[in-house]
Amino acid sequence: MPEFFTVLPPEAALAKWFEHVPAAAQPETVALADALDRVTAASIRAPAAVPAFPRSIMDGYAVRAADTFGASQTLPVYLAVIGEVPMGRAPAFNLQPATCAVVHTGGMLPEGADAVVMIEVTQQSRENEIEVLRAVAPGENVLRVGDDIAEGMEMLPAGHRLRPQDLGGLAAVGIVSVTVARRPRIALLATGDEVVPPEVEPAPGQIRDVNSYAVAGQIAHAGGAPVRCGIAPDDYEALLTMARAALDDADMLVLSAGSSVSVRDMTADVINALGQPGMLVHGVALKPGKPAILAVCGGKPVVGLPGNPVSAMVVADLFVVPAVQRLQGAVASTPRQAARAKLTHNLPSQAGRVDYTPARLVTRNGERWAEPVFGKSNQIFTLVLADGMIITPADANGLQAGEMVEVRLF
Amino acid sequence: MPEFFTVLPPEAALAKWFEHVPAAAQPETVALADALDRVTAASIRAPAAVPAFPRSIMDGYAVRAADTFGASQTLPVYLAVIGEVPMGRAPAFNLQPATCAVVHTGGMLPEGADAVVMIEVTQQSRENEIEVLRAVAPGENVLRVGDDIAEGMEMLPAGHRLRPQDLGGLAAVGIVSVTVARRPRIALLATGDEVVPPEVEPAPGQIRDVNSYAVAGQIAHAGGAPVRCGIAPDDYEALLTMARAALDDADMLVLSAGSSVSVRDMTADVINALGQPGMLVHGVALKPGKPAILAVCGGKPVVGLPGNPVSAMVVADLFVVPAVQRLQGAVASTPRQAARAKLTHNLPSQAGRVDYTPARLVTRNGERWAEPVFGKSNQIFTLVLADGMIITPADANGLQAGEMVEVRLF
């Protein structure tokens, strides 16, 4: 059976596919405490300034800065201590010239004060009087209203994955529920007469379903909700029926397509029958992962993964993960996690093809090395033994032992 | 009030603390589908070999390799096709000399066969007979029993955080429930007369609790279960009562300690009253984060965070996160996520102190630059605006503009 592949490089394949993949996320509102790692559905502006009142950032004395001008060790300025700012309340007094008030870190400045003198540059001269040994400028040691964030300022853009500090920022302005993208439901359908669920003891000739579990983990890390839809037999009608039901109930469908050519062709036919425009990419200049299928059926993305576990995970990393992020409207901001290391072995490659090689990071004489994990036919344990993937770019003819390479970490 | 600090470098402080922090995790069993990111409680050995039978890794013909020796384009070997291996079942025949059988990728080799000839190097000569145009060696294009993983081999060590591929590997051998470390419960107690929960509109002088939300996110990312225990007033008895209740119900207590010296001293006293040995480290050679408190009380770790949000998150990153991992028995294996970039500004520092500076990654003329986010007094939005932290090591007197630095990404 002939195998026709219009093989595009991975980026071109992704771009072609994404022309048809909707970027719009469906919003839902969650409590602040549940919003970690969720993606903002809209930009968020600060409803109030932080701080909302001038705050001391030191332990010391709230002063009128002008009163301290000229103060020095030899010629101190004397100020009357008229009170102490209570924590958590507005001071009941305001500051007249030549007076000051005890203030703690985080305390509110009284009316009239515009700076804080650190306790370390003062001396008590007598009861209720201090010597100031150094001048302070207006605003010194004070957080002014809005110094952390101004009212109305954009705090977080739309499509931003919420990090721990973002939850802190939202708490600071009193946002206790957040509108985020609903987690897209990603249906996973394994195929193959030989595939049984992991809880079943395989008969001779049968193997357990690996990809539904491994790819579900990748989907969950990307913010999606994986939905395992079982295992379809190598039968066109049965596969089509199960694939249609899975897609109807989800935002995206990932088929683990089996590895024999006839099964792959059947998968392609099934995907084309699921809806328009159907298959957009069949084959990517990628190793492993060449037989990847990228499709959109009735407005929903559909991916056909190669059956081999490493191929399936590489294709999922390159296409399923970005699609799951896109379905949340996520804008990627930080570079992918990577480590630099010296390569232990030559890695031959073909120009025009991107190669992914599982690798282990090892330390030799204090240096970090990347050691390829070679395994026959890219089975799952080559990845279990690896810390990441060495990527040989399309414009390279291979990588040399001793060369410094980037290992994209898992 | 005098402030005594025995300031240790961060690593020495962690090591001193960890002498008293138990590394033992409490095990629990979870379903495979729920095991992502959990930490294995014991090493896991393969209960069965994968594959369990010799499998073809190509579409082609199962053969006895010896039959093909000498085969070439000009002098093909003729083999009788005696059947087709069904997917998912053991073939009902075995292979006699000079015969072969159709086999698909993933199919089981019949008894007698020891190699597979790819379909591309064969030709059909007549019905039920093929010409083999190239010799194959025994084992060629075949995954033998245990080629992916051998029976009894250690698949995963204890203390290993389960990644997507690890779930795949466990599925491959039929392990559908996994013994992992119970998520440690980490109590978070904010303190301060001025602090109100985020849902409350602060009166003048009051601010919202930021740290309980930001640090909860860091704890969750480290695999812990954060438990927010509210806000204690600046009162020794009240704080002690709330801290004791929080610690009783948790595996670890994190106090967000306020920033004024008197409040910090009270926090230290409360921590010492919680149990033996009490405070082990008071002060770290770190900026921001110097006033960190590390303690163990009655066998449970207790941390006093500085009240300032950036300080709190730096201290949490350096001490709370490793402790949460230690309470799961986790063994860190991969290096921390970091990006290399050129520094846009000089960053002065003091030798002997580790500095953390929030930084944004920006691209200029195709180069990646790290731009420090300067903010008065390290408020939360300096971190919201940042992509990571530039670390100035203790043995440096600062970093120079234009220098290549590592940015530890959030």
Image (tube, coloured by chain):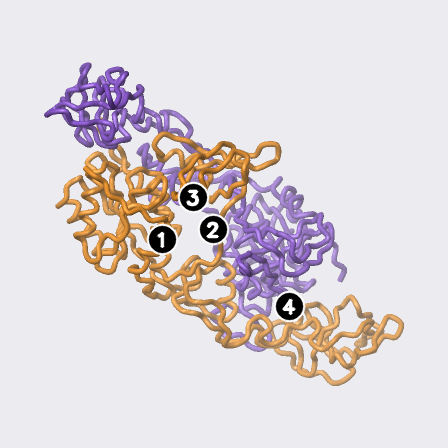
Chain colours: A orange, B purple
Labelled pair 4, 3 in contact (Cβ < 8 Å): no
Q: In the shown orientation, is residue A67 left or right of residue A231?
A: right
Q: Nearer the viewer, mark 2 or mark 3?
A: 2
Name the kind of residue labelled 2 in the image. Arg
The numbered dot on residue B376 is 4
Q: Nearer the viewer, mark 3 or mark 1?
A: 1
Q: Which residue is at a point 37% across and 28% down the rendered structure image?
A: B149
The numbered dot on residue B38 is 3
The answer for which chain carries disc 3 is B
Query: Judging from the image, what secondary structure is the residue with disc 1 in?
Result: helix
Q: In the shown orientation, is residue A349 left or right of residue B309?
A: left
Q: Are marks 1 and 4 on the same chain?
A: no
| Mark 1 → mark 4, Cα distance in angstroms | 45 Å
Name the kind of residue labelled 4 in the image. Lys
| Mark 4 → mark 3, Cα distance in angstroms | 39 Å
The answer for which chain carries disc 1 is A
Labelled pair 2, 3 in contact (Cβ < 8 Å): no
Residue A140: x and y in percent read 71, 73
Q: Are marks 1 and 2 on the same chain?
A: yes
Q: Which residue is at a point 53% across and 74% down the rendered structure image?
A: B202
Q: Nearer the viewer, mark 4 or mark 3?
A: 4
The numbered dot on residue A336 is 2
In the rendered view, would you say B242 is above or below A315? below
Name the kind of residue labelled 1 in the image. Ala
| Mark 1 → mark 2, Cα distance in angstroms | 19 Å
Outermost residue on the right side: it is A74
| Mark 2 → mark 3, Cα distance in angstroms | 22 Å
Q: Which residue is at a point 49% across and 63% down the rendered structure image?
A: A166
